[in-house]
Amino acid sequence: AQTVTQSQPEMSVQEAETVTLSCTYDTSESDYYLFWYKQPPSRQMILVIRQEAYKQQNATENRFSVNFQKAAKSFSLKISDSQLGDAAMYFCAFTSNFGNEKLTFGTGTRLTIIP
Amino acid sequence: NAGVTQTPKFQVLKTGQSMTLQCAQDMNHNSMYWYRQDPGMGLRLIYYSASEGTTDKGEVPNGYNVSRLNKREFSLRLESAAPSQTSVYFCASRTGLAEAFFGQGTRLTVV
């Protein structure tokens, strides 16, 4: 079974600083996709970034980047120049290319931005 | 473009009552999902449907049933609601391994 673990229930960062959110996963498959979603107080789920396991290059989207370590099964999210609007719950998610279409989420990290 | 639409947005039920949560997507997605979100537990998969006519259990299917009515619609039914089913429910859809698009959620309270 696929599992996703986020070991940091809460994190805080000073505005304009950098923060890293951790995610590890467990799978026996070699071809899969990983995602980070953001959930602000509005409850809307918003895709932040996505990484394909077959790509060695880490994905980046503006101030958001990942550190994907396939051997360690680790997929952390780095937020640079943190802004007040980054305050939200962040969820890591996993899906395999095996064909069962299941999308598995971690328990989330609540990020607080300190002005 | 509506995306994923869930109804209702809020609902209060008495223990033992039944109800159906509706979900519809207009993006021609093959896969649809129902999750529940509880504090400290993230999003847990209840049921999913990889294609029209198929449904599969997720992590927490007990107490729920689903119907993939057609490609657009995927409903979640609570036959006899229990207080443990108090939660926020999300429907999502996608095609292949692309990003999932979510509805705005349904806050359900069972008293």
Image: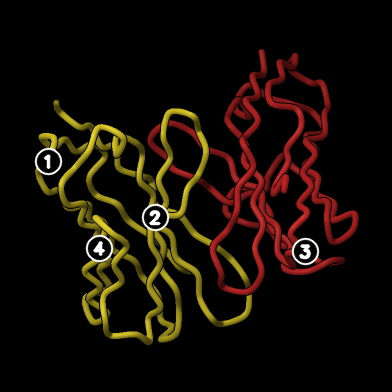
Q: Nearer the viewer, residue A101 or A17?
A: A17
Chain identifier of the red chain: B
Chain of the residue under the numbered disc 2 shown in the image: A
- Measure the C-alpha gap from mark 3 to mark 4: 30 Å
Q: Are marks 3 and 2 in contact (CB under 8 Å)?
A: no
Residue B18 in which image quadrant: top right
Q: Which residue: 62% across, 80% down?
A: A99
Q: Nearer the viewer, mark 3 or mark 1?
A: 1
Q: Nearer the viewer, residue B57 or B90?
A: B90
- Measure the C-alpha gap from mark 3 to mark 2: 22 Å
- Measure the C-alpha gap from mark 1 to mark 4: 15 Å
Q: Which residue: 83% across, 55% down?
A: B72
Q: Are marks 2 and 1 in contact (CB under 8 Å)?
A: no
**Neighbour class for label 1 at 10 Å: few (<14), some, many (≥20)?**
some
Q: Secondary structure at mark 3?
A: loop
- Measure the C-alpha gap from mark 3 to mark 1: 40 Å
Question: Mark 1 highlights which residue?
Answer: A16
Q: Are marks 3 and 4 in contact (CB under 8 Å)?
A: no
Please check whether the numbered discs 2 and 1 fall on a single chain.
yes
Residue B37 pos. (x, y %): 52, 37
Question: Mark 3 highlights which residue?
Answer: B28
Please check whether the numbered discs 3 and 2 fall on a single chain.
no
Q: Secondary structure at mark 2?
A: strand
Q: Amino acid at mark 2?
A: Val
